[in-house]
Amino acid sequence: MKQKAVPCTVYRGGTSRGVFFKESDLPKSKSAQEQIFMSAIDAYNPSQVNGLGSGTSHTSKVIVIRETDSKQACLAYTFYQVGIGEAIVDSAGTCGNLMAAVGAYAIDEGLAKSPLTDGICEVIVLNENINRLVRLEVPVVDGVAQVDGDYLMAGIAHTGAKISVSILSPGGGKTGTTFPADTRTDLVMNEQKVSVTISDIVNPFIFVNAQDFGLDGSESNNILSENQGLLTKLEALRVQGAVVAGMSETTDAAKEVPSIPKIALIASPCDYVTTSGIEVKAEEIDIIARMVSMGKFHRTFAGSGLYNLASTLLINGTIPNDCYTISELKQLQNVRIGHPDGIAEVTVELTSDRGDVAAVGLDRTARRILKGQCYVPGWR
């Protein structure tokens, strides 16, 4: 079959990488669009060697940009998680890391509404997966998003220009409420009750205390990844939680949506060694977390999950809050999350009654990697 060329751009945002398409360059048929996404990434091979993915959930991603007449947002976009060895295109969740790349894209493509003088440009975009506005502060030099800078984020070897991401009113994007099953609920695993918190902030997550599996925060992802039994148990909790939260009618239906809710093990601070061999001290962090994405332990931690966890642990009664000790809770709080490859700092602004989240933010870096044409088999 003859291939067709589709204009695209590849960006890294935070610890994720994605292929960006303009909606105007795509066919109108949804099935034809999904064929393009799966071919571009190569959903069909676990290695994704026949496309632009690399066999990991954080590089198997697509963003579609749409121009909008909104008075607030300069563009609207939809995120798609593409399968790894499976013909899946899923827009149920979103990606917190690639939000930074969307800000850079808006600058690079001339879509930002603010005048492009050198310095910090405020960009407002609409994330259509969660129907929330995202405010991005993007450094600009010579009319394009600045790449070079002195900000070093965990999971990336080189420093870059810092992009500040802030999601406004982030709760309830998928279920309509921040805690669709109250601040904690019991699920059943092998006839044993397990207390979890299901939190719908940016992306829905299920948080489980690692102690319920006889673990603490010192276990590395390498050790956990070898434990298929643990992954099987977590998947059973994940699909059950999806039903309890009203996101799926049955566990079988929940299995068909592997991207959300995601599930993560959390633990109180302790010393541990990152996958890069760096020692993290307990006093440097507020909580430790290991998340599962698309059936595998994530090598760092998804940006959307960082937003969610940082917000959830500040709310009394949640499982993450049990692991968090603080002398004084402020309305604007900085939370330090220890993940497999380092520490991420998230800024959370609570509502005046401290019962919900007004905004959540994270500093990232982003880089345009290539711009050109992606060749895919001809669509019908």
Image: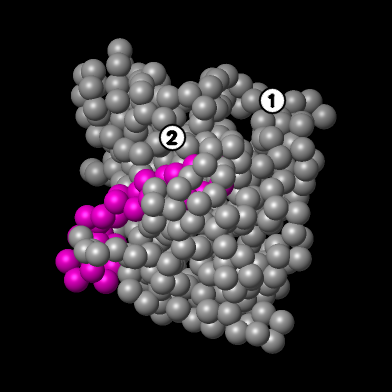
Residue at position x 39%, y 43% in the image: 76
- Majority secondary structure of magenta residues: strand
Amino acid type of disc 1?
A: Tyr
Give the residue at the far right of this rendering.
1
The residue type indicated by label 2 comes to Met
- Residue drawn at x 26%, y 55% is 333
357 versus 353 height, above or below: above
Quadrant housing the N terminus: top right
- Residue 153 is labelled as 2
Q: Residues within 10 Å of mark 2 (few under 14, many from 20)?
A: many
Work out whether residue 77 can be spotted: no
Q: Kindly give the residue lying farthest to the left in the view shown.
A: 352
| Residue 348, picture quadrant | bottom left
Q: Position of residue 300 (x, y in %)?
A: 55, 45
As drawn, the residue found furthest toward the bottom would be 191
The span picked out in magenta is 331-360
Residue that label 1 marks: 375
